[in-house]
Image (spheres, grey):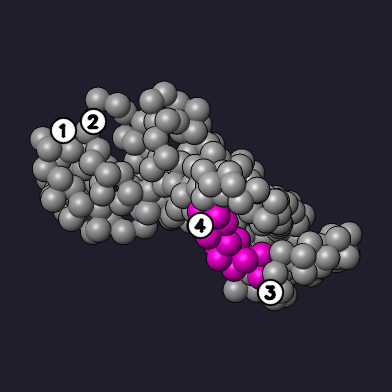
Amino acid sequence: MEAMAILLGISLLFAQPAPPPLEVDQLAKLLRAKETAKALTLLKRIGTLEHNDAEAKALVKLIRNRRIPKPPAVLEACFLALKGIKSRKVTRDLKALRKLNPLRKDPAVRIGICRALQGSADPAGAETIRALLRDPVDAVVAAAAEAAGAYRTAKQSIRKELFKTLVDIYVGTWNLKNSVQPDLKTEMRRAERKWERIRKPMEKSMQLLSNVTRNDPPAWRRWWNKNKHKRWGELEE
């Protein structure tokens, strides 16, 4: 009987399905071997890690690891795999990337953080987006503006905080563009470039967060001043 029990235990052991592969570990091996194409294929197969906190956390750790080469296309794909992440631990790790050398100097990392936090359920994600809306690089501001709209179903207080930051920067940039003296050509081009880069994503996100439509900066400012203390109500997907 004892021998039969041992044999049964062994048969059950071998009948157990193999554990799923550690996708991020495989990705790290491919990147160390400079197999960029295979790494991109693996990331495509992984898809989103929205519901896999352990692998998402491991992927952020891989992004932080300066000893593992990450070509721009791979770095972008890594952040897209984290899009909509709901784990507060992962959101916190993403926030920390903004201050980590040498990553904090790379606009692509800050843009990637915006992509990853787009639609995150963690309120701390919205706080990071608000900080990135004030980034000195226009492309980062535009990415943060786009990400802000994904919080349209968040609670009212979060939507209002995001909206206030958006409308302040949106109207402020428009005012700056219109106030620069024509003879200051460099400053004029800079103001116009920023306005053209951020205008559409900011307008779209303000529409999504408020569920209203306005067509110019003064109108958006008037709407905000009139409605910032009113109840907006909750929005559904």
Separation of marks 2 and 4 at Cα, in angstroms:
32 Å
Mark 4 is surrounded, within 10 Å at the Cα level, by few (under 14), some (14 to 19) or many (20 or more) other residues, namely: some
Mark nearer the N terminus (2 vs 4): 2
Q: Name the magenta segment's main secondary structure.
A: helix
Separation of marks 1 and 3 at Cα, in angstroms:
50 Å
Mark 2 is surrounded, within 10 Å at the Cα level, by few (under 14), some (14 to 19) or many (20 or more) other residues, namely: some
Tell me where residue 167 appears, x and y as whole percent: 71, 57
* Nearest the eye: 175 or 120: 175
Residue 215, quarter of picture? bottom right
Mark 1 is surrounded, within 10 Å at the Cα level, by few (under 14), some (14 to 19) or many (20 or more) other residues, namely: few
Question: Is 162 placed above or below 96 here?
Answer: below
Tell me where residue 67 appears, x and y as whole percent: 25, 25
Residue picked out by circle 2: 68
Tell me where residue 43 appears, x and y as whole percent: 25, 53
Separation of marks 3 and 4 at Cα, in angstroms:
17 Å
| Residue type at the position of mark 4 | Arg
Q: Nearer the viewer, mark 2 or mark 3?
A: 3
